[in-house]
Amino acid sequence: MADETALQISVRELREAAARLLDAVEREFGPTVNLDADFYWSLDAVESFDLSNQPRQDVGSIAEDVEDTRGLLTREDGEVYLWHDLAHLAGIFLRISALDTPRAGDST
């Protein structure tokens, strides 16, 4: 079992890591990222951490993720639904990760 500090992270650390990653995304892809795909396999967030059961596999949509993330930006301050909004942002980040993943035979 990991020690307690390995299972904790400060919001400051998350913010700094996200800023560094987004700076790298902008350097790699420019100010607008062409996500160039829509549907992807998705796991329920709660089920994905219950290793005693096989999680349900679902289909996510990048178009829906982008739409809902943009919707977050138009809501009143404080109108955030972490479980929902983070799942959509995670779908976008997962796609960017896939776009940057070296493939077998690629020279990197």
Image (cartoon, rainbow, N blue to C red):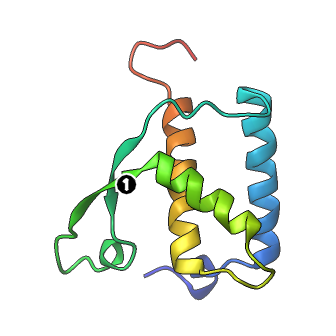
Q: Secondary structure at mark 1?
A: strand
Viewer-nearest residue: 8 or 77: 77
Q: Is residue 67 placed above or below 29 in the rendered structure?
A: below
Amino acid residing under circle 1 = Gly
- The percent position of residue 8, horizontal first and vertical second, equals 63, 81
Between residue 91 and residue 47, name the one nearer to us. 91
Instruction: Name which residue lies at 43% across and 23% down.
Output: 103
On the image, the x and y values in percent for residue 39 come to 36, 43
Image quadrant of residue 6? Answer: bottom right
> x, y (%) of residue 9?
68, 77
Q: Is residue 51 left or right of residue 65?
A: left
Residue 28 in percent (x, y) is at: 72, 28
Q: Does residue 97 appear left or right of residue 49 in this picture?
A: right
What quarter of the picture does the C terminus occupy?
Answer: top right
Locate residue 90 relative to residue 49 in the image: left or right. right
Above or below for 103 versus 11: above
Q: Judge whether 6 appears above or below 17 on screen.
A: below
Quadrant of res 81: bottom right
Which residue does the image show at 75% across and 79% down from the upper left?
Answer: 10
* Label 1 crowd (10 A; few <14 / some 14-19 / many >=20): some
Residue 4 falls in which quadrant of the image?
bottom right
Q: Which residue is mark 1?
A: 60
Judging depth in this view, the residue of 96 and 53 nearest the camera is: 96
**In-image side of 15 versus 2 (left or right):** right
How many tags in the picture? 1
